[in-house]
């Protein structure tokens, strides 16, 4: 029987492991990290979908309402009336908490203003209402929305109808020069529960007239129409009730109803108001518009659901 013995390197002394031949890279083969002592390049950091922005000022109107402004990034562009995501980092390493907020500043403003409610146990506003100048908030990079002039066809009169913090986009649209060049009359309707909730009342009745860009136009073309539902007021009740009763039009010296030939409407606020007012507008022949197909009236479906 033939016995096969393993091949050994007889040149190496017994008990000494033979040396391996040196590694030689084939000509043209790439040099990899394993072939060199240089550390691998770190993967590029993923860009954040949010801006981290400094708070410039905060104003508390009541124990339920406040406004604040943040710095505006140089590359941030939006149309007056659009909304953006606003939020704060999550607590204990959780994901950021964000909500949609209408931008209360016009497209030309150097700072970004927002109008917010206070919810004591709200995941976001519980903390957001405590911000101070110098603090930071998160803001999304992609504004959007349908409460913009582009979503409306031309007309003679623009109605901006809102409840509560639904006033925010009107603060933007009412300070846009294009609003006054497109419409001869602009009517801001704001419905709240209590008189103290009429934030920006002084602004719409006087302050806006001092605006260096649109002050003269606002003084000649803008009408402010507030209503209050739970306290005595010169124009009491829900805006929808004053529309159906005809009181709204009588107070303003206008023909009763809305005309698809002359009236254009934007709606923002409670779902009940938006739904009811939209139905009223449809009975007068007004058609809902969008960015893709401008119409006679628009509402923000991102808030309505």
Image: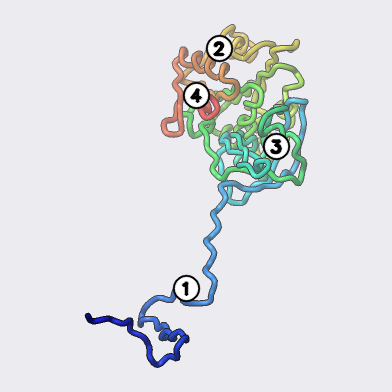
- Tell me what residue is drawn at x 54 percent, y 43 percent: 142
Quarter location, residue 224: top right
Q: CA distance from mark 2 to mark 4?
A: 18 Å
Relative height, residue 35 to residue 262 (above, below): below
Q: Secondary structure at mark 4?
A: strand
Q: CA distance from mark 2 to mark 1?
A: 83 Å
Which of discs 2 and 4 lies nearer the camera? The answer is 4
Determine contact: label 2, label 3, CB under 8 Å. Answer: no
Quarter location, residue 57: top right
How many residues crowd around disc 4 within 10 Å: few (fewer than 14), some, or many (20 or more)? many
Which residue in the protein does label 2 denote? 255
Determine contact: label 1, label 4, CB under 8 Å. Answer: no
Q: Secondary structure at mark 2?
A: loop
Question: How many labels sit on residues?
Answer: 4
Q: CA distance from mark 2 to mark 3?
A: 31 Å
- Tell me what residue is drawn at x 62 percent, y 36 percent: 103
Which residue in the protein does label 1 denote? 34
Name the image colouring.
Answer: rainbow
Q: Quadrant of the N terminus?
A: bottom left
Q: Secondary structure at mark 3?
A: loop
Q: In the current view of this chain or complex, which residue is farthest to the bottom? A: 11
Image side of residue 91 versus residue 6, left or right: right
How many residues crowd around disc 2 within 10 Å: few (fewer than 14), some, or many (20 or more)? few
How many residues crowd around disc 3 within 10 Å: few (fewer than 14), some, or many (20 or more)? some
Who is closer to the viewer here, 265 or 68?
68
């Amino acid at each position: 029987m033939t016995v096969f013995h393993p091949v050994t390197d007889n040149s190496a002394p017994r008990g000494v492991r033979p040396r391996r031949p040196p590694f030689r890279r084939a000509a043209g083969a790439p040099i990899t990290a394993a072939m060199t002592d240089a550390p691998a390049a770190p993967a590029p950091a993923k860009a954040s979908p949010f801006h981290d922005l400094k708070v410039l000022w905060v104003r508390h109107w009541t124990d339920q309402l406040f406004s604040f402004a943040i710095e505006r990034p140089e590359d941030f562009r939006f149309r007056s009336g659009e909304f953006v995501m606003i939020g704060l980092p999550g607590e204990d390493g959780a994901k950021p908490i964000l909500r949609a907020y209408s931008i209360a500043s016009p497209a030309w403003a150097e700072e970004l203003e927002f109008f917010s409610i206070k919810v004591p146990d709200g995941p976001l506003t519980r903390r957001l209402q405590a911000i101070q100048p110098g603090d930071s908030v998160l803001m999304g990079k992609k504004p959007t929305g349908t409460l913009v002039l582009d979503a409306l066809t031309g007309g003679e009169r623009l109605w901006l109808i809102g409840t509560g913090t639904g006033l925010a986009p009107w603060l933007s649209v009412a300070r846009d020069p294009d609003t006054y060049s497109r419409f001869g009359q602009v009517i801001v309707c704001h419905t709240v529960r209590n008189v103290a909730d009429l934030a920006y009342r002084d602004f719409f009745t006087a302050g806006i007239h001092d605006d260096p860009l649109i002050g003269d136009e606002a003084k000649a073309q803008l009408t402010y129409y507030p209503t209050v539902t739970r306290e005595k007021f010169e124009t009491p009740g829900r805006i929808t009730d004053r529309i159906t009763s005809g009181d709204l039009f009588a107070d303003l010296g206008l023909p009763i109803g809305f005309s698809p030939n002359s009236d254009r409407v934007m709606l923002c606020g409670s779902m009940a108001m938006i739904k009811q007012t939209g139905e009223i507008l449809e009975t007068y022949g007004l058609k809902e518009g969008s960015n893709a197909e401008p119409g006679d009236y628009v509402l923000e479906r991102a808030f309505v659901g």
